[in-house]
Image (spheres, rainbow, N blue to C red):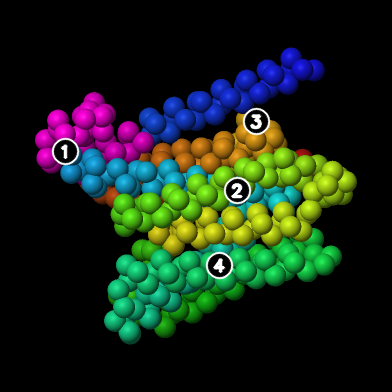
Amino acid sequence: ALVQQRQREARRWRFLAVFIVLIVITLLLDIATGPSQLPLLDVVHTLWSPANTDAMTRTIVIEMRLPIALMALVVGASLGLGGAQMQTLLDNPLASPFTLGIAAAAGFGAALALVMSSYLGLHSIFSIPVGAFLFSMLAASLLFGLALMRNVSSQTIILAGIALLFLFQSLLSLLQFVSSPELNQQIVFWLFGSLMRTTWQTLTITTVVTLVCAVLLYRDAWKLTCLRLGEARARSLGVNINRLRIKTLVLVALMTATAISFVGIIGFVGLVAPHIGRMLIGEDQRFLIPLSALCGAAMLSVSSVISKSIVPGALFPIGIVKAIIGVPFFIWLILGRGRKHA
């Protein structure tokens, strides 16, 4: 049994190593692709020795494309890790920040900020992230309050999240209906999800928040693994379920709200990445937490490359590309669960 356990752990470490290599490759490809294609060797040389590269290539690689490529990795890791913990906490494979209404609340907050900015003369670069963050945290706070109530099951929290999803989508539709065509176009563009507004400042904020939340979640890896055995068994092992539920919800909401507020709504990463991680390494949170983050980062980085390669010279919103990739997996997941319960 000890030998088999060591073999399983060695296999899990190999999967982590494979995804790290994949992320490095996709990062280089993401930097190389764009309206002006760059040879991969030139990208590597610029990153390794920027002082020995011509000014134009250095500007394109370091100042324009590198922060966007890194933001794809950070946002993907944030959404992948957030989805994994939502599914673990609520014991539901369809749980994610997107399906629980947090992303819809961020979309409404951003749209409301755009409308208010047009009337009050505020700068949308600052008002959109603030509005998206505040409303996503508002939606998360409603879920926190529900989780604090006694005799509230995880299924009730999921249903409440779905209700929030429809509520904020309806409010967003109302806002689009009463807005001018120019504002409507800006709202729709933000809802598509895009990494093009990334700056080194927004990248730094998102990275710091994601790293801090990931470390705090990893400290509860043992408790989260026990939770997968069932709430009754986890309580018998000394796990405070209510405290763990609130702490995890707060960290996931903070992490995903920060990411969404800067790049817009990007769905399916938090739904798909955790399932790939579980299929590869199982429920051990010591490995599932980093693998879900790595898988989400790789998925969004690949989507970024595809979004710039569909039509040479054109940039498609990454949220559209991610949805096209994620929908077939979502359907397969539903059909697979249907056959399982049949």
Tag 1: amino acid:
Thr
Q: Which residues are magenta?
A: 27-56
Residue position for label 1: 57
Q: Sequence-wise, which precedes: disc 2 or disc 4? A: 4
Tag 3: amino acid:
Ile
How many residues crowd around disc 3 within 10 Å: few (fewer than 14), some, or many (20 or more)? some
Snapshot quadrant of residue 7: top right
**Measured Cα–Cα span from mark 2 to mark 3:** 21 Å
Q: Secondary structure at mark 4?
A: helix
Q: Does the magenta segment cover residue 45?
A: yes
How many residues crowd around disc 1 within 10 Å: few (fewer than 14), some, or many (20 or more)? some
Residue position for label 3: 281
Tag 2: amino acid:
Leu
**Measured Cα–Cα span from mark 3 to mark 1:** 40 Å
Residue position for label 4: 137
Left or right: 296 with respect to 100? left
